């Protein structure tokens, strides 16, 4: 049997039945975006690899926790990736991560992002850490579907066309979610005292 021809749902059903080959196929299918998101959040390859391992270990341990009625498998896997990475960051109290400070609409290109510089002075690093915490909180306040498109753009670096293809959603839906998410983020960050410089 060629597992690569099976749908995500068929593969999950086989993982529930403890089929390791099905898990391997899901790994082949999704490990790259999982790693990319984890690396953007964690900032270090070895930590990103830990997140990837834990995400697929969780998929093996609790495949039934994915509910296909609530969205696509990639949506769920990236949500698990985000949560796992943030949990690990909080445990380590390590904020050396790529954070989107210049929040603006981007039709097809890659949104700008600012990376914390390890060589910066302690006051600057502390400021960036505070900004990162504020931004992460604002992201968590977004509806899951809107948060996901922002994370795929800023942390994984996908264009809106690529996001639509990855999620199996119409491009117009992705654009609408992005626009609404950006509006909410701007308002939330302004309320929290974090303003974008012109």
Image: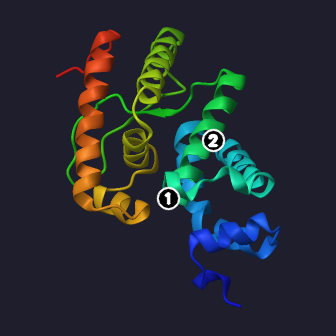
Instruction: Give the image quarter of residue 168.
Output: bottom left
Residue at (60% x, 69% y) in the render: 9
Label 2 sits on a secondary structure element that is loop
Coordinates of residue 138 in the picture (x, y in percent): 41, 23
Q: Where is mark 2, residue-wise? A: 44
Q: Is residue 162 above or below residue 186?
A: below
Which quarter shows the N terminus? bottom right
Residue at (59% x, 54% y) in the render: 67
Coordinates of residue 178 in the picture (x, y in percent): 28, 43
Q: Where is mark 1, residue-wise? A: 72
Identity of the residue furthest to the front in this view: 69
Residue at (69% x, 69% y) in the render: 13
Colour convention of the picture: rainbow
Q: Is residue 127 visible?
A: yes
Q: Is residue 8 above or below residue 54?
A: below
Residue at (50% x, 19% y) in the render: 133
Q: Is residue 73 left or right of residue 191?
A: right
**Label 1 or label 2, whichever comes before in sequence order:** 2
**Closest to the observer, 10 or 191:** 10
Coordinates of residue 192 in the picture (x, y in percent): 35, 11
Which quarter shows the C terminus? top left
Label 1 sits on a secondary structure element that is loop
Q: Is residue 21 above or below residue 5?
A: above
Spatial CA span between label 1 and label 2:
28 Å
């Amino acid at each position: 049997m060629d597992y690569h021809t099976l749908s995500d749902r068929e593969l999950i059903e086989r993982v529930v039945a403890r089929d390791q080959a099905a898990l391997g196929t899901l790994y082949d299918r999704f490990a790259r975006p999982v790693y990319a998101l984890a690396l953007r959040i964690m900032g270090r390859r070895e930590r990103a690899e830990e997140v990837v391992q834990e995400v697929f270990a969780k998929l093996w341990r609790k495949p039934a926790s994915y509910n296909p009625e609530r969205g696509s498998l990639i949506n769920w896997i990236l949500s698990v990736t985000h949560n796992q990475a943030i949990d690990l960051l909080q445990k380590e109290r390590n904020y050396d991560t790529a954070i989107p400070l210049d929040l603006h609409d981007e039709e097809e290109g890659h949104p700008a992002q600012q990376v914390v510089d390890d060589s910066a002075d302690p006051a600057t690093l502390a400021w960036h850490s505070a900004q990162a915490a504020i931004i992460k909180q604002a992201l968590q306040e977004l509806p899951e579907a809107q948060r996901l498109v922002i994370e795929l753009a800023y942390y994984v670096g996908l264009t809106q066309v690529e996001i639509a293809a990855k999620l199996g959603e119409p491009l117009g839906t992705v654009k609408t979610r992005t626009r609404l998410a950006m509006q909410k983020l701007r308002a939330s960050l302004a309320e929290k005292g974090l303003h974008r410089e012109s």
